[in-house]
Image (cartoon, rainbow, N blue to C red):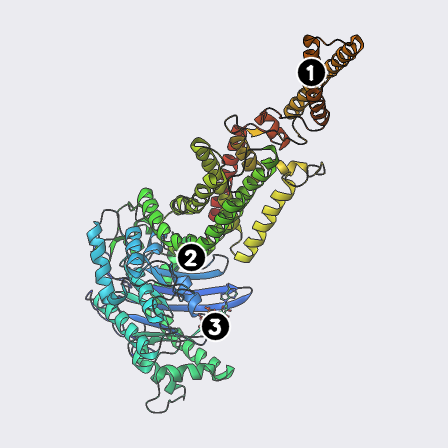
Amino acid sequence: MKDHWYETPRRTGYRLAKYSEKGGMQSGEELSRLTVPLQRGSVKEGVNLHFRGIYVQIDGKDVLHDVSGTVKPGELLAVMGPSGSGKTTLLSVLSGRVAPEHLKSGEILINGGPITKRIKRKICYVLQQDIFLGNLTLRETLMFTAMLRLPEKMAYHEKEKKVEEIVDALDIRKCLDTLIGTDIKRGLSGGEKKRANIASELLTDPSLMLLDEPTSGLDSSTAYSLMTTVKQYTEQHNKTVVTTIHQPSSQIYHMFDKLLLMADGEIAYFGDAHNILEFFSRLGMQPKPNYNPADFILEKVKESDEVERKIINASNEMRKVSTLSPLTDSIETLSTSRKNSTQNGGIKTISGQNHRNGLDPKDVHLNHVPNGAVAVDMGESDKEAKWPTGFLTQYKVLTQRNFKEAKPRLYSRLNWIQNIAVTLILALVWFQTPLVEEKIRDVSGAIFFLITYWGFMPMADALLAFPSERLVVNKERLAGSYRLSSYYLAKVTSEAPLMLLLPTFMISVCYPMCGFGNAAGFFTTWSLLMLSALTAQSIGFFLSSVFFNFREGLVAVSVFMLTNLLLGGFYNTDIPYWLSWVQYLAFLSYSFQAQLLVHFTPDHLYRCSTDKSLFNTCIAAMNSTSAEATVGNIGTAAATTLSSVLTSTAAALNSTSEMILNATTQATTSLSTTSLSSTMVANATTVPPSLPMVHIPPEEVLNQLGVKFPIWVDILVMLGIMFGFRYLAYLVLRYFRKPK
Ligand SMILES: Nc1ncnc2c1ncn2[C@@H]1O[C@H](COP(=O)(O)OP(=O)(O)OP(=O)(O)O)[C@@H](O)[C@H]1O
């Protein structure tokens, strides 16, 4: 074996520090220079990455066991190994995303310094899955990323230019206006998505790029073209790239500068990728001529446990020799002598060069400059803001992005069809409902339906709010793109107007068609319906933050709504005392009562029933009408008697005088008329004769319908529930849904 392991960067003019298994260092005076030289001031350089002795244990199993390596600017390190050998875990460790309880030990140096929180944010980590918001186009995706992750002071047109450059570099210009796509809606192809994934990470111009399986799922020519692009980008822009890869073609394999072969969490080889066959041949393992080296080494590692052990042992031997070399000695000395080794996200990080220069690791940080790579500053206090953009910019950009993303979800064709159908049924069934006592129950039924429907719908819609974009938000939060608070506020702000359009449509059609009131009444009814829908949405947000699984969330919404309905006093007024308190928590009950209060008002009176009424005012009016009718009956009887007396007197006197005859005729006529009237009055004792137009006082209707509180109490309670649940959802996201 010849030269391998560490060498100082060509670009910085340092001499090669070569080691051989036999002889150790051949040119070692630069051993102290493990990294790119760091000078005071801003030095636009690449990043040297060193990791050493990484141990990761998950559930008692050693996932990574003493893994070490190094990569320089302009180099492409491939991490290969059978499935489950720990490749992804290693990338997670390098990006600082492994839980502290799993990372038992290890050191990671970036340019000889520790990975501070800010440096961590400058490392681009392209995940294996292509995580995007599917309803945005590629251009929108990249522009929103640029707006969020590039410095605020960078002009908009510069950000556009940057996007254009990256799009060209990755050859995805032709699909700039194509939707990313979802499971249902087709969009970018697999290869385009991979490029888009890398493009969105490259926007921040990271110096260290960690790519997890960038070619998985791609056909060989797409994979080759993608890796060619990555290789060119690495060299041209002096990037340091670590990529995991499963089974590269030989063409792709030859692009790698270094290879880290993993087997069962251990190193089976680390060194120059082109020396791998030599390493295997020294172990007596020769590939057939023209055999793909990648296939060969993976086959060997997987051949049997003994072969795997033999390869690992040989690799360890090779590393031992290297450990004796002055270079690694030097690392050792540095690591042990370090006074200020720091703990960062579970990763023990040490400062190398900086300490020797008498500088504190805290003073080493990476600054992003718009057009260059990472600028390594030393000796200056860390003045860089924690976030690339301010709260307001984040809020504005995220609101716009969410508005675009949520619109297709909330205004899907299915949603419109459903709502138009329900609106039509409601408007036709309750069409021009007359304002009579018999219709009070019907109208309150319509109100109840409206608030229940607009209780359930926003709640169920909100269930998808967080789970649908959880992966994107987690990825962006881990990359330090924005604050959770700005995301959350943007989310609730942008979804509110979107959600309110459909109930507004429904109430605007139904209110006049059903004859529910005048314009003033419409406004208050609409406002209360919106408040109710927003309250329901808040509960949905909360449930969505708790249950990331949609099915579980749907069950939670159903249980919540049914509890509201069953214990809210709508169906049963005789709720057991130990459960009766629940009705005071039922938001539907407040919403319903508020709607009743604005509907049954003095401007919108209902007429008493002409049959049996339930309302005191109507009963009293009915009774007084009956009494009047009885008094009239008595008068008629007296007239009849008088007429009879007159008639009989006339007959008795046998008077033929005209006057008396006239009187008799008049009396007879009067008798027949009176008899008719008497019959009518007799019938009116059960049905009053024309009951005067009596209206039911609204308070009697409200009392009858069980309204308990004044409207301001209902509104206050709904506002309380709305803000309370929104805040609870935020707390859940912040403390229980931290991205890992
Ligand atoms: N969170 C976890 N809980 C339990 N086991 C885990 C966890 N993460 C990783 N492992 C285990 O660690 C081992 C290495 O996993 P890792 O994903 O790093 O492998 P890999 O080489 O990237 O595999 P692949 O090539 O299939 O993606 C596997 O055995 C895996 O089951």
- Mark 3 vs 2, N-terminal side: 3
Mark nearer the viewer, 2 or 1: 1
- 693 relative position to 244: left or right: right
Residue sitting nearer the eye, 237 or 684: 684
- Where is 429 relative to 714, above or below? below
Tell me where residue 19 sits by quadrant. bottom left
Residue 92 position, x and y percent, is 42, 63
Tell me where residue 705 sits by quadrant. top right
Residue sitting nearer the eye, 43 or 506: 506
Look at mark 1 in the image and give the residue it sits on: 665
| Circle 1 SS class | helix
Residue drawn at x 49%, y 42% as measured from the top left: 533
Q: Cβ of disc 3 within 8 Å of ligand 1? A: yes
Residue 349 position, x and y percent, is 39, 57
Residue 711 position, x and y percent, is 53, 29
| Circle 3 SS class | loop
The CA span between labels 3 and 2 is 44 Å
Instruction: Specify the amino acid type for callout 3.
Output: Gly
Look at mark 3 in the image and give the residue it sits on: 84
Residue 22 in view (yes/no): no
Look at mark 2 in the image and give the residue it sits on: 413
- Where is 679 relative to 354, above or below? above
- Mark 2 vs 1, N-terminal side: 2
- Mark 1 vs 3, N-terminal side: 3
- Where is 265 relative to 376, above or below? below
| Circle 2 SS class | helix
Tell me where residue 293 sits by quadrant. bottom left
The CA span between labels 2 and 1 is 83 Å
- 372 relative position to 731: left or right: left
**Rendered-image quadrant of the N terminus:** bottom left
